[in-house]
Amino acid sequence: MRKFYNKVVIIGCGAVGASIAYALSIQGTVSKLVLIDVNRDKAEGEVLDIGQGMLNFTPMEIYCGDYSDVADCDIIIVASGVGRRPGDTRLDLAKNNVNIIKSVAENIKPHYNGAIILMVANPVDILTYVMYKELGIPSSKIFGTGTALDTARFKYFLSQELDVSVNNVHGYIIGEHGDSQFPVISSLNIAGTPFNEYCESAGITLDVEAIADRVRNAGAEVIKKKHATYYAIASSVCRIVYAIIKDEHAVLPVSTVECGSYGLENVSIGLPSIVNAEGINKVLTLRLSDDEKKKLSDSAATLKEILDEAM
């Protein structure tokens, strides 16, 4: 029987998971929202806090549940894991969270019934691939937030420098959600005008690589000032959830294990992909320059190295 509601389960109710839950309640596209956390009191507290403000938003059902709730849900958002501590390397973070994600996968597996799994926990590319291997589900059904947040940051910084709406900045950050990510400058444009041509006509000199460096360090900049970052990633998750629920066929730079014709395999990496109600419909093949092709290959190699050591 066809369901007439959209049920989303969030696993992990730390700052990121709770922010996602709150943002989804404001967005109003979800009918049922279930929060799961090893600290049940924390999940129950978030349910109460969000639920008590529901009068002011589109009504939805929100409750604290358990892994059996994934049996009839549409989307599973995995935000569980530990944050990066001072002195930790990316490998340290990967090793810590790989074990957590394996445990989450073990709990999901008995109840999994075809829902789309959206990975948010970091390092997201590594953990997306681990979850994919642990569950053995079709690659179209699981992907990570990838470089969606990095792309949003990139467009935001460019829009500020160019004094145009962020909605008129078109381009992507691809690769790892981490140090080896990079902007696809060859296809960057402002409202359809190639980036360099736009800057020349406007008399603007702008160092895109400097902007890209700022994007790489944007999370650390926020963490330095407020000790954590969670609102921006929550908004990125909401955008992806909307594309799924509305069967939007939106092109979003997410971390996918199906890399199309780029010649990449055995890795999950951020690439523009068509996202709809079935998950990943298609990975787009961008016309990358030779330099960009090398950067993508190097980024994948970096992820594979971390993955091999973390597993």
Image (cartoon, rainbow, N blue to C red):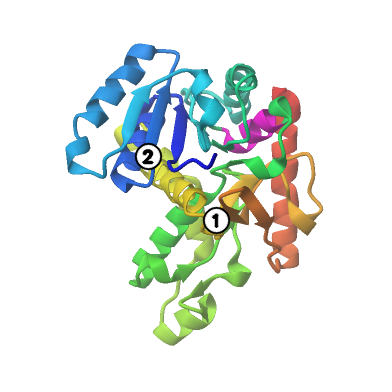
**Residue 307, percent from left and from top:** 71, 30
Q: Residue furthest front?
A: 1
The reply to whether callout 1 and callout 2 are in contact (CB within 8 Å) is: no
Tell me the kind of residue under disc 2.
Ser
Question: Is 41 displayed left or right of 240 in the figure?
Answer: left
Question: Is 17 displayed left or right of 52 in the figure?
Answer: right
**Residue 20 lies in what quarter of the image?**
top left
- Quadrant including the N terminus: top right
The span picked out in magenta is 123-132
Query: Which residue sits at x=32%, y=32%?
Result: 61
**Residue 34, percent from left and from top:** 41, 27
Give the main secondary structure, helix, strand or loop, of the magenta stretch.
helix
Secondary structure at numbered mark 2: loop
Q: Identify the mark nearer the N-term, 1 or 2.
A: 2
Tell me the kind of residue under disc 1.
Leu
> Is 284 inside the magenta-drawn segment?
no
**In front of the other: 104 or 66:** 66
Query: Which residue sits at x=79%, y=44%?
Result: 265
Badge number at residue 140: none
Q: Few, some or many C-alpha atoms within 10 Å of disc 1 (few <14, some 14-19, many ≥20)?
A: many
- How far is mark 1 from mark 2, CA to CA? 23 Å
Q: Is residue 168 above or below residue 98?
A: below
Q: Is residue 267 above or below residue 287?
A: above
What residue would you read off at disc 2?
Answer: 31
**Residue 177, percent from left and from top:** 57, 43
What residue would you read off at disc 1?
Answer: 252
Secondary structure at numbered mark 1: strand
